[in-house]
Every structure is written in structure tokens, then in C-alpha cells.
Amino acid sequence: MFQSLNKKRVLITGASGGIGAATAELFSRYGAIVGIHYNSNEKAAKKLQAIIEKENGSAFLIKADLLDRDSCSNLVGEFIRLTGGVDILINNAGAFAGTTHFTDLDNDSWDRTINLNLTAPFIVARSAFAQMMKQGGGKIINISSISAKYGGSETSIHYGAAKAGLEAVTKTLARAGAPHKILVNAVQPGVIDTPAHQKIGRISLDERIKTIPLKRAGVPLDVARMCIFLGSVGGDYITGQIYSISGGD
């Protein structure tokens, strides 16, 4: 089934680490031509590219600041320039600014979080959608979050709101894309063990893990496997869906 990914042109935003890196490496193992988007972590992006190329894969590095709308608009065009088209877009890049209680959340943190997690993926998807219409089809996979399901915590309300918006965008693009053979879905990771938790001050996941039916955190590969399924022929009759990868959470 995954042999259908051979030579597919796959652009992954936020691919220098975590879920994005695991997804890029997995797609490359099945012969996909991978676009590794990064912003500041060039060292990690180059390391990932080297790993892929060592395994005889093909990967291109593309730097872009997704908080800059011109960079968002140009990202897909740069990937097309390098590869000739885009068959699969995975909108993975995401994070949130500000970790205070929402009563103390400053407007800039709200704006940056909404822009990175909702506005940027929409702009990137819009560009990919236009190219896929010309090509006669394609797939867009948006990486959401369990925060969209629960609404986020009191310190991540802005992140939850952005991801819920991204799921709404996913459903709209799926309806618009169906006549053009453009399939659009979202993957909703639960608690995934990545360095992102340390960046926002979470020292331990132990208490959160107790609330998960499977009693463990996920790993980036858990999410990558769903992405590769949707990107393959296995996902050819699936659109407008939200898939939770959360251990039953």
C-alpha cells in the first residue's frame, strides 16, 4: 500500500524535529521526495536531510518564518520550484506563545499563537490547493491537537482555539476540494512525548498520563504512521475527517 508514495512530492512544515521529523523520515523510506521546512533550527534540519540521504532518500531544505505572511505565501512556490509540484502537504508546524493564565495573557501572545497555528497553515494550504487543482488532485493533512477537542487549558486557551479553527478549515477545504480530487483531513495528536513540553515548562507528564486510557504518552512515530496512511492509497476514499491519535483520550 505504501509503495504508492514512491516519488510523491511531500512538503512538511515544521519538519526539523518532533512529529515533523518523524513524518519526513517515514515518508522518505517509501520513496517520497520530502520538503523539510524549518525556521530557526537549521542544524536539526540539515541533520535530518543527511539521515534521509544516507538511506538513499531525497530531501530538500526550505527555510521560512511562518509568522511572516509573505514567507507563508512563498513556501509552497519554493517547494514547487525545487520538485515540480506538490502531491501532499502536511501542515505540522505549531507552538504557542505565553503560558500564563488567560486572565494575564497578553494580546501579542494571542495573536502569535493564532497566526502560527491557524492563519499560517491556511495560507500554506491555500497555495497548495491552487497547485493541486492544476495537477488534478492532491492531499492536505493538517496537524491539529487534542486541545481542539477539550478547548485547551486555562494556560493554553489560545492554542486550543487555533487548533479548533484549523479543524474547521480542514472540513471546509475538504468540501471545496472533493470535485478536484483534493482530499483534506486532520490528525489530532494527544499527549506526545516531544521536547515541546519542556519548552512550555512542563517538567513531567506523569499526572497527565494517568488520565489517558492506554496509560502512556504517544511518540512522534504514532502520528507519522497516521499521516503516511492518509497520504497513501489507503486514504484515497477519506476526506473531511479528524483522526485522534491519543491513546483513547
Image (spheres, grey):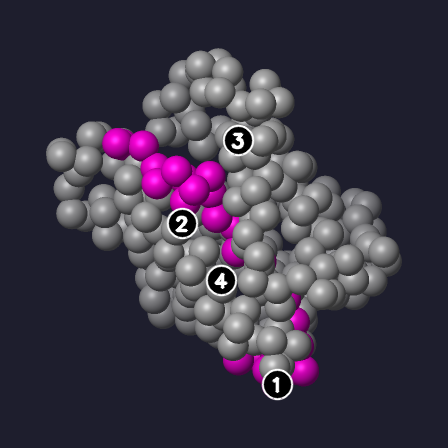
Kind of element beneath mark 2: helix
Q: CA distance from mark 4 to mark 1?
A: 20 Å
Q: Secondary structure at mark 3?
A: loop
The reply to whether the C-beta atoms of the residues labelled 2 and 4 are less than 8 Å apart is no
Report which residue position mark 3 lands on.
249
Nearest to viewer (mark 2 / mark 1): 2
* Residue for badge 2: 163
Residue extent of the magenta highlight: 129-155
**Image spot of residue 4 (x, y percent):** 83, 62
The span from disc 2 to disc 4 (Cα, nearest Å) is 10 Å
SS assignment at label 4: helix
Query: Which mark is on residue 183?
Result: none
Q: Secondary structure at mark 1?
A: helix
Q: Nearer the viewer, mark 4 or mark 3?
A: 3
Tag 3: Cα neighbours inside 10 Å, few (<14), some, or many (≥20)?
Answer: some
Q: Give the percent coordinates (x, y) of residue 156.
A: 31, 36
Real-space Cα separation, disc 1 to disc 3, in angstroms? 39 Å
Q: Answer with mark 2 or mark 3, whichever residue precedes in sequence.
A: 2
Residue type at mark 3 is: Asp
Type of residue at label 2?
Lys
In terms of image quadrants, where is residue 1? bottom right
What residue is disc 1 on?
Answer: 134
Measured as percent of width and height from the top left, residue 166 is found at: 42, 56
- The disc labelled 4 sits on which kind of residue? Thr
Using the image as rendered, state which of residue 186 and residue 47 is in the foreground. Answer: 186
